[in-house]
Image (cartoon, coloured by chain):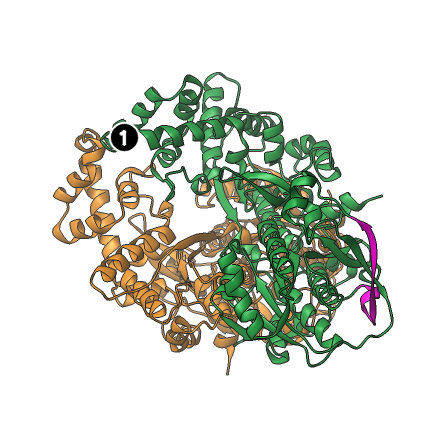
Chain colours: A green, B orange
Amino acid sequence: MTKSALQIARAAYQPKLPKALKGSVKAVEGAATQSVADQEAIQKLFPNTYGMPLIKFEEGEAIQLPAMNVGVILSGGQAPGGHNVISGLFDGIKTLNKDNKLYGFILGPGGLVDHNYMELTADIIDEYRNTGGFDIIGSGRTKLETPEQFEKGLEIINKLGIKALVIIGGDDSNTNACVLAEYYAAKNAGVQVIGCPKTIDGDLKNEMIETSFGFDTACKVYSEVIGNIQRDCNSARKYWHFIKLMGRSASHIALECALQVQPNVCIISEEVEAKDMSLDDVVTYIAKIVADRAAQGNNFGTVLIPEGLVEFIPAMKRLIAELNDFLAANAVEFANIKRSRQREYIISKLSKENAEIYASLPEGVARQLSLDRDPHGNVQVSLIETEKLLSEMVGTKLAQWKEEGKYVGKFAAQHHFFGYEGRCAAPSNYDADYCYSLGYTASMLIANGKTGYMSSVRNTTAPAAEWIAGGVPITMMMNMERRHGEMKPVIQKALVKLDGKPFLTFAAKRDQWALNTDYVYPGPIQYFGPTEVCDQPTKTLQLEQAK
Amino acid sequence: MTKSALQIARAAYQPKLPKALKGSVKAVEGAATQSVADQEAIQKLFPNTYGMPLIKFEEGEAIQLPAMNVGVILSGGQAPGGHNVISGLFDGIKTLNKDNKLYGFILGPGGLVDHNYMELTADIIDEYRNTGGFDIIGSGRTKLETPEQFEKGLEIINKLGIKALVIIGGDDSNTNACVLAEYYAAKNAGVQVIGCPKTIDGDLKNEMIETSFGFDTACKVYSEVIGNIQRDCNSARKYWHFIKLMGRSASHIALECALQVQPNVCIISEEVEAKDMSLDDVVTYIAKIVADRAAQGNNFGTVLIPEGLVEFIPAMKRLIAELNDFLAANAVEFANIKRSRQREYIISKLSKENAEIYASLPEGVARQLSLDRDPHGNVQVSLIETEKLLSEMVGTKLAQWKEEGKYVGKFAAQHHFFGYEGRCAAPSNYDADYCYSLGYTASMLIANGKTGYMSSVRNTTAPAAEWIAGGVPITMMMNMERRHGEMKPVIQKALVKLDGKPFLTFAAKRDQWALNTDYVYPGPIQYFGPTEVCDQPTKTLQLEQAK
């Protein structure tokens, strides 16, 4: 493996730990907990793992535990810092007993079911400290949901003498971790399950989980390149850059990037939904800013767009629902319509409200909505190039305003979509420390016999020594939600709160950012410089934690 | 202006200078020079600026010069380090005489013609030291070509008492700088013109100009995000990423990024042209690697594609030429063909060779070639999304091989295009030092009464103190080329040399990189860390300069 100079230098970084984890540790139990909603239903589904107390680690007496083996799984999309969770876990169990062993299941939860694993030795761990990616054991999207899977997993767990399993994943993976914990607890299998909060999307957070790991690094990478684009934009002064950012289920990434770079426009899906804005409302909002800037002679700017926007627009959701139903019911007839007449045909068949919206869409998007369907026959909303859809519709609106004498200017657009660029970046100091601490904390939850807990590290806007490490019962974060027509217990997703400080700070500034050119250029993540450059958490976290 | 922590910390960086420039300086003249080709024609066109000697600066005696005013212009696309050229120039002329003044012409060469300018004072300069972008005065693409423009420029030059003009630009802008130098010299206008070599594309280089500024930083930013994508690719193991990189006229950027990240595939346009490869040859080459990796169970990888590829494929050039001619001659008839029959119509009219290629193109690209035309009626090759064209054709080829039992695997692609992400990044230490030195050197060329020279800083793979600063007559880099049907004197573009060390190094490794997963992850540009992380020039330059 050839390594870059930075990879080599960065390998030597020793992530910081909370003070309480630096020596021997004892678990202090807090009050019993309740789920955030639907307490009765959740308690019934998790009789063995419901209502457990919060755990906080403090300095304690050294204890000697017999050797044990631990398994670890990376689940779902990559996020910067996954390797540090694993190295923290490794160092933690080795501190407990040097004969402890760590097994990694390969390519995600499927590795557990298919008995695909490897031992993670010190040599291997050392190759991956402070690196990005999940390539140490790979990740995968197999969902652990069925008793058959749990039993297949138990076979290999027993064979390897594994006492505890750590599942590193997002809200769904942690929900499944808890279901697995409950299953093994119910049958007294002697296997603990601990979760770790991962997702660049930032939508796995609550009172006890301040942030999901990877959000910090990913947002900083996106803000770096957006900042570079803004500097270009402000130098050439001739393009509007429409920049879509990964994250379908919440707009935390777009909001954080907006707070970092101060763009001219940033759309927040949660606000669009709350205000029941139509696609035309969003387009008009952007076009108005383009026109106002043009009136000042500035025919350039930046627009940040969350990937999931279309799915948050209530009217678009209704259109898509009707399209799904209609096309499913009339598949044969539709297949016989000539391509050039399809649009007309669909417009003639939809309800008035939806027909009007459909007719307003650019041809490419309209075609995509009627043609590209997933294996269940549903419209593939994720394929819609929202950044092009919006810029095309803004262009159309401006052309109309120009005819009406309401707009004088030039409008030319460039498009970008950032996602894969940031998911596997080498973790920032924050994520390197946070992830290492999460992994180390997981080892202490295991040593204390806990199951159904998520590793929790809080107070992370303070210096690392003051961070608070502990565990949160996963059931505490759950509520019941409809999934594929059935009510299921799931971890409540954290959307952008419209009354939260990050959004309010953005909302208070955005009109000024829209008209002025107030761009900030964050530059690339720095690992070696002054602390104010290298060690700042996200703006989101700083605002949320500000007293 | 709100500034990021990095912007603030980076402002304090003091760029390094060659030792010879640190005190008083004297100009040592070398031998007289010749243009690289067409000596007689070039000499005739540049009677006053042809054949001048090379200049090298050495430590000298302090001299006192009367105060003078200097003008500066940023021309063409942005490149990291432009602000440092200007701050080096500013510091240089202030060292010569603290009453010297610097004027910036606004939004490119057009600012000279339209008399749009501002004085660049110390306060302004200090705001922009070591920052990316050209926003200090903006840039533009107006070409300085006509005597009318030169005369308009002279009016404001005389009004402001400007003794010398520094034009920071690429090959075309420097060609025009030389034409302007010659014009003012011929009429004894008392105005010197000095050029500085700028372009992220890296195609303005020769024996005396080791590299154009911005190439280092831009390639490092692209390599950072490509590295991140490769780590993702190697973790998820399910996508082929097709990554297009800016640079239409040469493949230096793609080659440098390949040397930095070790991708599975990198196409070099110059090689495609030299080997007379067809589009199908390129597609087959990529598909073969996809199939070979699939045979090892690896259904993922990365492909780097230079933006200008299509224009280097001889057969595509012939197709486009015929299409341009045919559609120009038959515009009215073509306009009456129904959209659904256009493809068929064109195929029926083209020569056999071109009809076959046209028929092999995906529908979207074929339509683009026949419909999207620039104001001169020509096909807009730059609009072709080459990364999607190639991945679609590779997919088609693999599907065919699958039917023939020659390929077993899954092929899913993601697409990226990087350009604006890197053009305005804050300059790397290399570019910060190199640009500052280029600007400082320009001031010394001015002080020594030179005109028609390009600022030259060499030996840049050595520590900055050992760099060699001087000037090169721009005519020395020129040859005659056909432009818009006329023979013109232009600076010879530097394409990737297929017998040069950078390409040979890549060619020797590429088969290994194709099959193995040998990715390197360069990570983000570092400004504060160990020197082996922060101060390395590009691989291209290191290989070219290696003894």
Q: Is residue B517 left or right of residue A501?
A: left
Q: Is residue B372 left or right of residue B517?
A: left
Query: Which residue matches tag 1?
Result: A334
Which of the 4 quarters of the picture holds residue A340?
Answer: top left
Q: Nearer the viewer, residue B445 or B537?
A: B537
Q: Is residue A30 magenta?
A: yes
Q: Position of residue B260 (x, y in %)?
A: 51, 69
Q: Residue furthest bottom?
A: B547
Which of the 4 quarters of the picture holds residue B213?
Answer: bottom right
Q: Is residue B540 left or right of residue A444?
A: left
| Magenta residue span | A18-32
Q: Position of residue B80 (x, y in %)?
A: 58, 56
Task: Say which residue appears at 59% left-offset and 60% top-offset.
Answer: A425
Q: Position of residue A284 (x, y in %)?
A: 54, 25
Q: Nearer the viewer, residue A35 or A332?
A: A35
Q: Confirm whether residue B429 shows in the render.
A: no
Give SS at disc 1: helix
What is the tally of numbered marks visible in this picture? 1
